Amino acid sequence: MSVLLMPKATAVWLVENTGLTFDQIAEFCTMHVLEVQGIADGEVAIGIVGADPIANAQLTREEIQRCETDPKARLKLLTKDIPETMQRTRGARYTPIAKRQDKPSAIAWLLRYHPELTDAQCGHLLGTTKSTIQKVRDRTHWDMQNIKPTSPVMLGLCSQNALDDAIAKAARVGERRRKEAEREQRRSERDKVEAAAVSNDTNANS
């Protein structure tokens, strides 16, 4: 059974490059129509580079044109005869040698578009080290002149779901820290008010 690769990135590409309706894109990419509308409004999938389903051999230009002329038509995913390999769920993730040189570009992309991610999260996503991340961050990497920020999903270094999960986790941590900071600030202000009240009472009684 064929499965659409990088559905969110594909939706970004379809929104930007076709005249398909939000309903057509949402159904093809297994997304909610409001999420697709959010992509068009620039509120969803910020920083995600569109994935061309034609280049990925998952759609044809003719199929897109067919659905552009008929809003009620639905896109059909191209089927592949090659059986899908089982996903590896345990053990360290192996990165092919040909893709290892792409890691610095993926690191640069994450640092630029998702600075909320920790070095540990970036390292886990890309299978790289904190040392390499730091060298890209402070621009001391030996190949810095050739590093161009590129989505790790487009480079095949991680899945869109893994990237989305990491971003969501970072957002939750950031929100929790923000609330803790607000509580600490309110606590500090309350302590100051109470201290001032005690001081005023002391002065009034003296």
Image: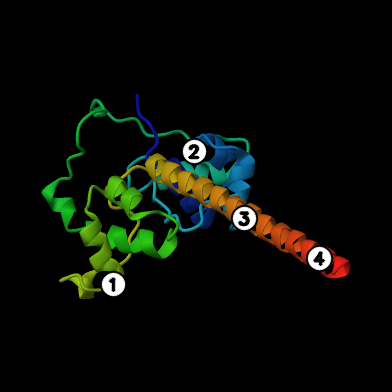
Q: Are marks 3 and 4 in contact (CB under 8 Å)?
A: no
The residue where tag 4 is placed is 202
The residue where tag 1 is placed is 138
Q: Residue at x 31, y 45 (%)?
A: 158
Spatial separation of the CA atoms under disc 4 and disc 1: 55 Å
Q: Are marks 4 and 2 in contact (CB under 8 Å)?
A: no
Few, some or many residues within 10 Å of mark 1 (<14, 14–19, 20+): few
Q: Position of residue 125 (x, y in %)?
A: 31, 46
The residue where tag 3 is placed is 184
In this view, the mark in front (2 or 1): 1
Q: Position of residue 114 (x, y in %)?
A: 43, 58
Rendered image coloring scheme: rainbow
Where disc 1 sits, the SS reads: loop
In this view, the mark in front (3 or 4): 4
Residue most extreme to the right: 204
Q: Which is more toward the observer, 5 or 81?
A: 5
Q: Amino acid at mark 4?
A: Thr
